[in-house]
Image: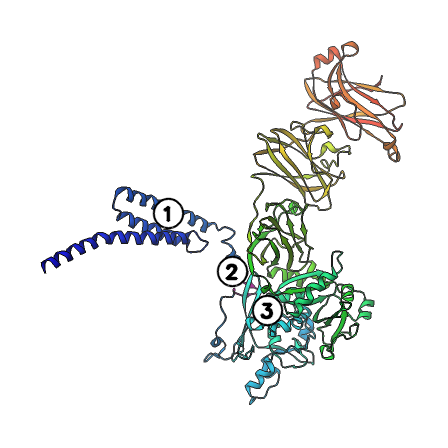
Amino acid sequence: MERRAQHADKSETRQDKTRPVANRRRRLQAAEALLARSRGDNRDALTHAIRAAELYMAAAGEAPSRPEAARLRRRCQELILHAEKLKAQQATPSSSSTQPDILRRASCLHGNDFPPWETDPLDDEFDVQPGVGLFTDDAVFTLSATQAENFAAWTRPADLFRLESDREKSKDEDAMMQLTNRCDLVQDITTDCSVVASLSAAVQVLVGRHAVLSSIMFPFDHAKRRPRLSASGKYVLRMNFNGCSRRVVVDDRLPASRTDRALFVVDRRNPRLLWPALLEKAYLKVRGGYDFPGSNSGTDLWVLTGWIPEQLFLHREDFDIDETWARIKGAHESQDVVLTLGTGRISAEEEQLMGLIGEHDYAVENLDSAADGSARNLLIKNPWCDGPVMAGTGRPGPRESEGDNTTWMTLEDVAQHFESMYLNWNPGLFAHRQDRHFTWEMPPKYLEASLVRNPQFTLSSPKGGSVWVLVSRHFVDAELDIARNRRGSMAAVARQLGFMSILVFDNQGKRVQVSDGATYRGPYVDSPQTLARLGSSPGKQYTIVVDQHEFPLSSYTFTMSLFSHAPLEVQEAEEKMSYFNEQLGSWSRRTAGGNSSCAAYFQNPQYRLSISKASPVSILLSTDNREVHVHIDLVWARGERATTVRVKDLVSSSGEYRRGCAVADVPMLEPGVYTMVCSTFEAGQMAAFAMRVASMAPVTLDPVPADAAGRLRTPLAAFRLPEGEERRRVPLNVSWLTRASVAVRSVLPPGAEDGGRQASSLMIRVSVVEGWGPGLVTIAVSGEGEFQEPVTAIRAPDFDMEPDRIQRRGMWLLIEYIGTHHTAWTINGEILSDSPVHVGAWEPL
């Protein structure tokens, strides 16, 4: 017994010694696990980091040695610093951490809350609550003036369809919720032709093998594969807008009419069919009411089903009719695409001839082609119940495939008479999807012509392949207000909300400044969505840019969704350069000097650019007037005002004059001081501009003072150039020491311009000299002593005028000219000085 007791004592002693080791090991393991979780992108990262630091501190107190304790305390301090960084990041969220906030803020529309979808509602949510009665949605649904004239009341289905009080519920449910792909959905005096066209075209994907309706409308009877009547009159719909799937709640009341006109979508084969009207009501709640100004079917189906919208412009030169048919025919047979069509503005003659309605959406209910592909036909439906009869090409399919508002039309006729084809694709065709949510603050007007403030992303695929990029603009109340308050056609209203496009660059994923060089340039659409279908090479990085024209609001939120067959890497694009210097300026009456062939070129805004280290440099010039053509010249002028631009002085330029903005790229700019000239093509064009210099080394940028800044202007008497004369001089004098420069120009009087300059070979040199004869000394000379064409002002650089020397030796301004010239040529000019200059009379020599 004693030996067993001693053995037990030793065992307990060993356990006491090993227990702290085990506890410390567990603490360290838990700390490392928490640390790993704190490195992730989650809202509890800070809590995990703090708890990990506490565990390390506790482990340090149990360390078996001082070095181990010191190591653990150092680790604890590192975690404390890590926690501080996380705290700072939470105070100033990064773009990725602000994405949930973007979705949250995008939930409110028209006074209604549409929260992101979290889970499908349970069946008991649709039961009648004791003492509450039927569910009534308090949302306000506005009506158009015509709708209001016919409106009677918001009415429950039992009263609307005049159901007997002792009716059998199952029969009611069969009538109001029965699923059939033979629906004949029509609109009457509703304004949402695109919605009804969308529902008509999408019936097969809603109730067919994909059964999309089962995932977007609740309550749903999965056993019978159809929506279920809600006992409480409450319905919850899952709709896709503003960045995610969202919960939309409506009651079952519909707008009853006091006349025989219908105010909601109706199935003419089953007037009691309820679920299309509830889908319509939910969608119109999102869009602002039954009077919303209109949309297009691609947008409608994106919201209703989440299927990817693509808009084809049938009149564009790059529209490939054969490729389009090949794409849609097989996908339509497998129910992986929904097709709708839209007309543009058409003439009254075409409306009467073809039976089409301008700016109206139509459903495509079927496709058919001959076995040899010689005939390709679409079954087109007009959603208006009393619409005109469309002219078609006959009936290639069975008789039952036609309805009262449908007709078969060849693909060629469709391409001729319709403006757009809307395709909504099954997102299940892609194995991978990414969503990026972002805010875009609209740039100031003087940067709108460039892309420097546009959202830009780097896209790469390790395996390459097809990538679809969809950019969707979030709905906001302000856009609905604009659409409602402005008059015009549906297309005109849509255009008032602006246009957007996607541009793609093979640019190593770096940010770009202008749209030149885009490998893909999407159309500018007035829809809230635009799609780019791209092919990517393995590992290559592309730059995706979102662009806009005429967006009326100051700020927008967007979602970019990327669909692919292989994983993608997407992040915000980074700048190619490290340093940026921006300046604002303008071309005014005094400074709009025009291009280098204009006499006033030297008056253009100029900047002194100084760089102390060799670096690539990119110079952007962007103006607030997109119609003005602009240009940049970077010249060797030591930061002083450039009067002319000679080839040998030119360091770099932006090339041809470009509308709105221009870029001059210098692969490597050597250290030094340069002069930058910003010009418009025409003299006198006034506009504001921004200049942005990007580089890998610091650059200083300072305006060069105007040529006459702080100086007196003394005009020179004008004179004509007689035949045979080659030189003329005028004496100069001052009363005290003066700094001065001279500018001389040649002009033709009105009426002598035609052919005058072209026939002339006149060359001029301007000099300032002291003394005469053998003692003549040149003080300043234009063009480094070379004769120059007088297409611009010819200037002699700054020189000093000393009264005593002038009194002793004399000073003259000398004009020399050679070559043939028009006898009407006139020479004039001016002296710019910091003190008065006395000018005598011209003397021919």
Check disc 3 and give the amino acid type.
Lys
Q: In which quarter of the image is residue 773?
A: top right
Q: In which quarter of the image is residue 659?
A: top right
- Residue position for label 3: 285
Check disc 1 and give the amino acid type.
Leu
The span shown in magenta is: 106-116
Q: How crowded is mark 2: few (under 14 residues within 10 Å), some or many (20 or more)?
A: some
Q: Which mark is residue 79?
A: 1
Q: Which of marks 2 and 3 is nearer the N terminus?
A: 2
Foreground pick, 209 / 176: 209
Most distant residue in the bottom direction: 166
Rendering coords of residue 203 (x, y %): 64, 73
Rendering coords of residue 441 (x, y %): 59, 51
- Residue position for label 2: 104
Check disc 2 and give the amino acid type.
Arg
Give the structural element (helix, strand or loop) at label 3.
Answer: helix
Q: Disc 2 vs disc 1: which is toward the camera?
A: 1
Dot 2 and dot 3 residues touching (CB under 8 Å): no
Q: Which mark is residue 364?
A: none
From this view, report whether residue 770 is shown above or below residue 22: above
Give the structural element (helix, strand or loop) at label 1.
Answer: helix
Of the 4 image quadrants, the one containing the C terminus is top right
Of the 4 image quadrants, the one containing the N terminus is bottom left
Most distant residue in the left direction: 2
Foreground pick, 567 / 509: 567
Q: How is the image coloured?
A: rainbow
